[in-house]
């Protein structure tokens, strides 16, 4: 029970990597609030995992929703020990000069502005308590960008830089900030990354991963659990690649 007595918020926690993190946290004793636009899926996961897990509908790009999310966590748990900024999106693969402004704005809002908004709502609480762990779910795209995913790559590079900046600023306040960089995984976003889901395209993606498989939600849950637990009390500002060796 590595997270016994801890309370956590996981944005985008209803599916994919977020659901893997929620499952792992709950199994390790944490109370978890799933914050997701898909409230039906979030509620279903909360029911499956039991009383320690709750759900709230949240648009992480809207300040009012993020405030309501933080208020819901404080009302339910009394404190927020862990924040996982997992909600993310991408644009379809295309030449950088052909990505629409609408897609660019959406990617930057979900992947970047959300981190700004959650920090404004939750960092003051962690500062007052002089304790807390924040985990940003970035991507190997921040380290080794794939062609035709230009603005998604850029948004994840922003996230890793933000992670380090947050870490150095918040360390004196007792708050740790880390990130994980997943490689492509079996999540709802996989088809968007690939453009089309065919055996040929999958084989091309897998050929770039030395361990020879896609990442799983459980892989991310295990890495997130370590970084957010007291076992990692001396770890901050780290962007951990959970990528099967892709970035070597």
Image: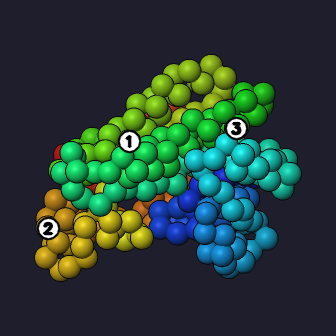
Residue at x-position 13% and y-position 76%: 200
**Left/right of residue 132 with respect to residue 21 in the rendered view:** right
Residue 81 seen in the current view: yes
Measured Cα–Cα span from mark 3 to mark 1 = 22 Å
Residue visible at 66% across and 23% down in the picture:
173
Q: Is residue 121 left or right of residue 218?
A: right
- Mark 2: few/some/many CA within 10 Å (<14, 14-19, 20+): few
The residue at the point 52 percent across, 53 percent down is 86
Q: CA distance from mark 2 to mark 3?
A: 40 Å
The residue to which callout 3 is attached is 122
Q: CA distance from mark 2 to mark 1?
A: 24 Å
* Mark 2 / mark 3, whichever is N-terminal: 3
* Label tally: 3
Q: Mark 3, residues whose alpha carbon is within 10 Å: few (<14), some, or many (≥20)?
A: many
Residue receiving disc 1 = 155
Q: x, y percentage for residue 134?
A: 58, 40
- Give the SS element for disc 2: helix
Q: Nearer the viewer, residue 149 or 219?
A: 149
**What is the secondary structure assignment of the residue under circle 3?**
helix
Residue 148 placement (x, y as % from top left)? 20, 52
Instruction: Say which residue label 2 marks.
Output: 204
The first of marks 3 and 1 along the sequence is 3
């Amino acid at each position: 029970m590595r997270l016994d007595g801890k309370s956590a918020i996981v944005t985008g926690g209803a599916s994919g990597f977020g659901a893997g993190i929620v499952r792992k946290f709950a199994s390790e004793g944490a109370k978890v609030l799933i914050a997701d636009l898909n409230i039906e899926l979030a509620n279903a996961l909360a029911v499956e995992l039991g009383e320690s897990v709750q759900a709230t509908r949240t648009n992480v790009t809207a300040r009012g929703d993020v405030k309501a999310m933080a208020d819901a966590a404080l009302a339910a748990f009394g404190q927020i020990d862990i924040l996982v900024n997992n909600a993310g999106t991408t644009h379809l693969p295309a030449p950088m000069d052909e990505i629409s402004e609408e897609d660019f704005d959406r990617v930057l809002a979900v992947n970047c502005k959300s981190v700004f908004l959650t920090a404004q709502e939750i960092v003051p609480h962690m500062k007052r308590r002089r304790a807390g762990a924040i985990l940003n779910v970035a991507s190997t795209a921040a380290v080794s960008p794939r062609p035709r995913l230009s603005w998604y790559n850029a948004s994840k590079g922003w996230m890793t830089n933000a992670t380090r900046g947050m870490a150095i600023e918040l360390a004196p306040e007792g708050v740790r900030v880390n990130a994980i960089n997943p490689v492509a995984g079996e999540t709802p976003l996989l088809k968007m990354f690939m453009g089309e889901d065919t055996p040929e395209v999958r084989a091309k993606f897998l050929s770039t991963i030395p361990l020879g498989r896609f990442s799983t939600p459980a892989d991310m849950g295990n890495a997130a659990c370590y970084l957010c637990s007291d076992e990692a009390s001396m770890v901050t500002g780290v962007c951990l690649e959970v990528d099967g060796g892709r970035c070597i």
